[in-house]
Image: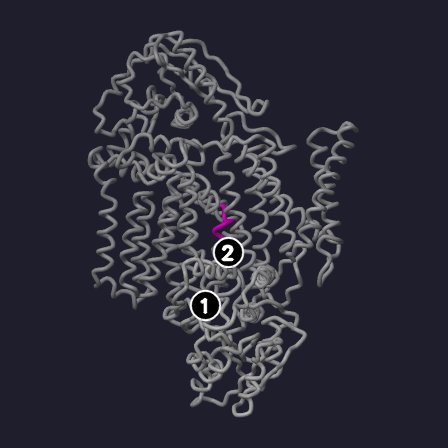
Amino acid sequence: MVPTLNEAGNIGRLLEEVFAACGSGPAIEVVVVDDGSTDGTREKVLAWSETHPVRLVARDHERGLAGAVLAGAEAAVGGAIVVMDADLSHPPACIPDLARPVLEGTRDMVIGSRYVPGGATPGWPLKRRITSRVAGALSWPLVDVRDPLAGFFAIRRENLLKLDRGVKGLKIGLEAMVKGGDDLRVSETPITFVDRTSGASKMSTKQITAYLKQLPALAGGSVSGGNAGRFAVVGLIGLAVDRLTFQMLWLTGLSLAAAHLLSFLAATAANYALNSRWAFAAGPCTHRLGSAGYAKFLTVCLLALFMRGGVLGMAVGAWHWPPMAGLVVALLAAAVVNYVGCAFFVFPLPTPHLGATMRWRIAAVGVAAYAFLLRLVYLGSLDLLPEEAYYWNYAQHPALSYLDHPPMVAWLIRLGTAVFGDTEFGVRIGGFLCAIVAAGFGYGLTRNMFDKSTAMRALLLMAVLPFFFIFGLFSTPDAPLIACWAAALFFLERALLGERRTAWWGVGVCLGLGMLSKYTIALLGPATLAYLVLDRSSRRWLRRPEPYLAVLLAVLLFCPVIVWNAWHGWASFAFQSVGRMDDNAQFSLHTLLLAMALLLTPVGLIAVVKALLPHWLGGPDLGNHPTAIRRRWFTLAFTLAPLAVFVLFSLRHSPKLNWTGPLWLAVIPMLAWELVPSRGVIANAAEQFGRRLWAPTVVVTLILFGGFLHYLALGLPGVVGYDHNMTLPVAWEEMGRLVEDLEHTTEEMTGQEPLVVGMDKYYIASQMAFYRRDALNPQEGVVNTTSNLFYGNGLMYEYWFPSREQNGRTLILVSFDAKALEYKVVAARVRSLGPIQEQSITKNGRTVGHFFYRLAYGYHAGQDKERPMGHPCPAIGRRLCQRAGL
């Protein structure tokens, strides 16, 4: 089938090459569908029809490639149709390669692809290559092929006839693939695409616009210029309703919070009614008013509100824009979220062609994009966590490693702050990029194990499961650990299941970088051995050099940490091994289970348990094929082996909340696969109910994440204030300014620069270092320390500020607990003490916390504080050193 429009210069040569290429194959017929050519194209086709099986379908009052192809399909008599352009850009010699799988019944559609290995586009300038790739990338969520916009393809005639005759645009092949759904068997074969040498191209702005309209329609989105304009009008009406309702309620004596919330609900109800009956009503469907529809609309409004708050906080707080300018950008961001949510989630087009698989793919794109942008806009709006401020202090004291963690987090923060300055955004951007890396490798791992649809659902899970969301927002050692763990699993799957020897080099690099992030990744070693025990065919790797070379490469990359430990008496290794053992044994398995439920959500934890169960106990049915069995072993080994370590530990010791997080990466592919039932498999009632729980879980987690971030950055109307003990990352900057004022006052009074001492493990000291910008001395670094001057363990502060070097200094003791300033050991280490005073912390005119401070004059270190810096015993405790044999 050859659609034409003024192709007289090409049609004759094309027909010659077509019959030459297909002369020895099955009987063919060439159907030329002409849309009103005036250059003699029709006459040439008619002349060919006298001597060859060529037929002309003339269309004088219709235009468009899609309509031409459908008209040709109705006129054709063959069961397989090859669609190609008349401009000689598609090589006729490839027709047999395209048609053969369709004729043999092994494929329903075969695409002549420019972008699979062997395909080429000679002579294309860089701009055109980029444009083509970008255009193809826009349809990436909808199809699995590499060249979705190809106009050269073979397809079963019945599949073309299933399409609506009203289809418009140039990309009829894309339409056929999307509407064919999961049942359409598609493959690609390479071609060399050459530009036309005669005639004019049919590509135009009109065709590009038609393609851009086609994409959201295929995905079920009711997107158009008309409803976008009406949506904007409805938004203005809602704004007026909100303001008028608020004024009325406020004048009647309601509280500010109550008036705000009730006016918001009134505005959303009005907007929902107008959008349903007017803005999105024009089209192939109408939307009934109802509580379910309003609940969806309210959900979208909340998500838009939280995005608006993030953009506003970023523009005003981080970029220091005027509030009104920031509000304009924030309103635009909220409008985009609201419109897209309404078009695809609240008022979508009727899409009977979209099955569960495609709906989850589209949802994955929307959810992952929203979660990505939500984290991005809040990166610079939230005060640092105390842990982040502590790791920022790492970066201010460059070293090969540190007592409680390897150096990767410090390196990332150092790089981020070098580019973006000593800001919250600069501290966190490294962790954020690590989350993107982890998502990419998680996608690749899942696609290798299953398929693209499952991989996209894996992206969705990694966007909303709490562990992955949180540690892609904050800068902690877990962020690079997750990235390295995901990458290591990707290369391990390629090595063990894909049987690629070169993948072991990737394993070695990822393990080495992971060990530079957090020692936990070493658990992948026993997990790999467990898999080799389970899978007999993989045991040959024990006799191959590649795994051992990977271990050697990992050790070489890990050398900085080994050198630091050797220089400091193996302090870090002892701290992370025997240092985690408590003297008082306590059963904490229940704590571990609770932590797992928090990291995965209860629905996620139940799904993990089900995914790990054997099929006869209700687990997933992957079939009995050897490949499926090996996938099963891979998931079990790399999930259960690390988990067993934490379970055993929790039987006698208390685990940390975040410890099990990375190991769930191995089960994410199975969770994503279980999210949609396999073709031809009838799920029981329990499975159906479990799958139905995922959609509300995704929505609820997004709302909770957005609401909590908004609460931390800007607060929430009607919600009680922050904890006065400063357990949340709010108002640390305000506290830093207060402490800085105290420091200046004390220095003027004593004539000596005081040392700020946070009387806890490291929280206050670290935050005051970051938020007291005058505390950063180019020669000395951050001039404050922790309670280790008197008691306890100050972690790296004991290395940065040895107590014996502070003799004679004036101290400003700062604590959230006044009792910490009254300990006898404090009085014993100083010449004299000032009175304990309380200072309130205010943010946006509201008291959000308080702290106590006290001046201490003439500090002197105790005898037990005198030691060489190379020896770690007092820093980690004599008991730990004795256990470690140091």
Residue tagged by mark 1?
622
Q: Magenta part of the protein: which range? A: 461-466
* Name of the residue lying farthest toward the bottom: 51
The image shows residue 63, relative to residue 96, as above or below, that is: above
- How far apart are the two marked residues, 2 and 1, measured between alpha carbons? 16 Å
The image shows residue 819, relative to residue 881, as above or below, that is: above
Q: Position of residue 82 (x, y in %)?
A: 51, 79
Mark 2 surroundings within 10 Å by alpha-carbon count, few (fewer than 14), some (14 through 19), many (20 or more) = many
Mark 1 surroundings within 10 Å by alpha-carbon count, few (fewer than 14), some (14 through 19), many (20 or more) = some
Describe the element under mark 2 as helix, strand or loop: helix
Which circle's residue, 2 or 1, is located before the other in the chain? 2
**Mark number displayed over residue 340:** none
Majority secondary structure of magenta residues: helix
Query: Does residue 356 appear to the left or right of 620 in the view shown?
Result: right
Q: Quadrant of the N terminus?
A: bottom right
Mark 2 vs 1: CB contact within 8 A: no
Q: Residue at x 48, y 59 (%)?
A: 137
Q: What residue type is disc 2 on?
A: Ala
The image shows residue 52, relative to residue 297, as above or below, that is: below
Q: What residue type is disc 1 on?
A: Leu
Asked if residue 803 is among those painted magenta in the image, a careful observer would answer: no
Describe the element under mark 1 as helix, strand or loop: loop
Q: Residue at x 31, y 51 (%)?
A: 510
Closest to the observer, 851 or 783: 783
Q: Residue at x 63, y 47 (%)?
A: 338
Closest to the observer, 434 or 651: 434
**Mark number displayed over residue 607:** 2
Closest to the observer, 883 or 204: 204
Q: Position of residue 552 (x, y in %)?
A: 21, 52
Query: Does residue 30 appear to the left or right of 536 in the view shown?
Result: right
Q: Position of residue 504 (x, y in %)?
A: 28, 58
